[in-house]
Amino acid sequence: MLPPSRRDFVSLTVSESGSYTNSKQWRRQSCWRKWKQLSRLQRSLILFTLMLLLVGGITTSPTLIGHWRDGVVGENGYDGKQPFVVNLKNEYRSIPPELPSENRLQTKTNASGLLGVENHGLHLKNADKGSKGGKPIISWRGAVIEEEHASDTDTKDTEIQDDPASLALAESRLEAVREAFRHAWKGYKNFAWGHDELKPISKSYGEWFGLGLTLIDALDTMWILGLKEEFAEARQWVAKELSFDKNVDVNLFESTIRILGSLLSTYHLTGDSLFLEKAKDIGSRLMPAFNTASKIPYSDVNIGKGTAHPPQWTSDSSVAEVTSIQLEFRELSRLTGDPKYKLAVMEVMKQVHKLDGKQDGLVPMFINTNNGLFTHQGMYTLGARADSYYEYLLKQWIQGGKTEKEFLDDYLQAVEGVKKNLLKKSTPSGLAFVGELSHGHFSPKMDHLVCFLPGTLALGAHYGLPADHMELAKQLMETCYQMYAQMEIGLSPEIAHFNMHEGSTQDVDVKIADRHNLLRPETVESLFYLYRFTKDKKYQQWGWEILQNFNKYTRVPTGGYTSINNVRDPASPNPRDKMESFFLGETLKYFYLLFSEDPNLISLDKYVFNTEAHPLPIWPQSE
Ligand code: DMJ
């Protein structure tokens, strides 16, 4: 403390630069004197401590570490930026991948080798909104996102709802989804552990491929929901028990979207190489499917023997199946640096792109593996056997950084084809729906599967496609919701028929054979996209009603959820005794994302979901 007279002097002269400089010089000289008075040992100790602090600061700085790592990789001839890419002309360069990191959790390996999960929970603060005011953007797992990499569109178009009431409501709904998952997992764990599907009523299991399908399909859902214990036990099963060296026939499409897709996604979210190794293993075992005369793959592969074949009754494959494996195999090539996966699936797309037999961009449902031509021509649907062809046109364009124009052209043409040929309105309410065309005859039949379309249209609009795609998305979203709301138990049938004749009193009819509900995800999936892009709370509310109805009519008290036979009879929905793997892989994941207020929880500017809800990274623009 200075004496009063000195204090007065300083306060009078501090604004004058000369005095300020003098005072700085004075402090420097005084420090230097003190330094000289120290013993040699004291000086060495201080210097050593300063060095320690400096080194510690450098090694904990993510930016500096990033530069350092890039530098080291660069010495080996790889700049760490450019992933492997094959363009449509099949030119390729082999460059190792760059992984997005902001959706990874903080992980650590514990003594048993299991991956621990830290830092769970929603991190929503005012600071989350952006760093314009000097505050960092904090991701859902607490990671700081640099401003230039933050999702501009998401935060612009979709404000984070951070008022206390919204957050409390969101948290209670998110917890309801986690609770539903735990309940489903309890049944799977107790009665079907390591098997493909839970049969919750008979407390047993069903096998399809014999590969633990539900467990694998659910891996990234557990990660996203923050279910540490469940994820750790599942990872242990993958590490210790999962083997693809089995004499089994698997369906190429189903095992690609559910197994390969989930392993790739879980690898990206966790950074755990176990999942990449498993992805490579199953990916290479699926490749014999492409050994056909036409290069259009067979539907079935024996992953142990390395042989492939079509179904017994036909040499056709379904169009959706051969054109909805591309996101996964393209990503596998990027990660491995081996072009063979991408080349195989791109060959299919090239052929389908050029084929005759389309109507205004709409494709028939079957393609022959011998001659590579469409079969059963003249039938067009956005439902089973064609649905995800349209979804993957848009999503491949997005995955590849919007450079592959053929995909965009085909997608835009197909949307016009839907509007021209398949889009109609019901009576009495005027619901827009997408029917089917059979040799020029229109049928007002719409599979629940078609309810992926509002979400896909909205995603395209988010990426700059015409605004009327978003308008159509909203109309079809309303229709898909009504397919639930107009049923007696508030859950959609597998197939709806829409009334178009004057005087009808209800929009939706359901045939007896179509009254089942398989716990499918498509409507919840689209609600997620629509909410993410519009922030209209009604979409969350609709999803909440649907979740409650799943709980009311499909939840089995001893664990698990079951598909049901009759959505029109609340007294007797009649369980089918099967929990499909996509209930955990997709439906519950999309519920969770729908109720989350955090646009960075799997940002749609960084990830593209495969058709089984497994997020894969969007490739950097430079590819
Ligand atoms: C899932 O396996 C995928 O979403 C696929 O694209 C369609 N069928 C089921 C879900 O309904």
Image (cartoon, grey):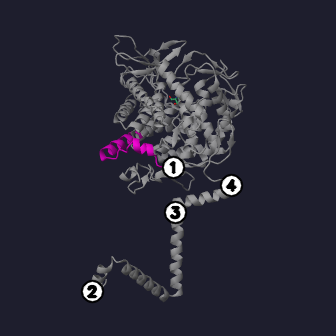
Marks 3 and 1, Cα distance to the nearest angstrom? Answer: 18 Å
- Secondary structure state at the residue bearing disc 2: helix
Which residue was labeled with disc 4?
Answer: 77
- Where are the magenta residues, as a range? 149-177
Which residue was labeled with disc 1?
Answer: 104
What percent of the width, then of the height, locates residue 306? 71, 33
| Callout 3 amino acid | Thr
Which badge, 3 or 1, comes first in the chain's sequence?
Answer: 3
Marks 2 and 1, Cα distance to the nearest angstrom? Answer: 60 Å
Q: Are marks 4 and 3 in contact (CB under 8 Å)?
A: no
Q: Which mark is residue 225?
A: none
| Callout 2 amino acid | Ser
Q: Quadrant of residue 472?
A: top left
Which residue was labeled with disc 2?
Answer: 5
Tell me the residue at 68%/30% (across/down).
289
> Residue 155 colored magenta?
yes
Q: Quadrant of residue 431?
A: top left
Q: Does the numbered disc 3 mark a residue whose Cβ is under 8 Å from ligand 1? A: no
Which badge, 2 or 1, comes first in the chain's sequence?
Answer: 2
> Residue 343 colored magenta?
no
Marks 4 and 2, Cα distance to the nearest angstrom? Answer: 67 Å
Marks 1 and 4, Cα distance to the nearest angstrom? Answer: 27 Å
- Secondary structure state at the residue bearing disc 3: loop
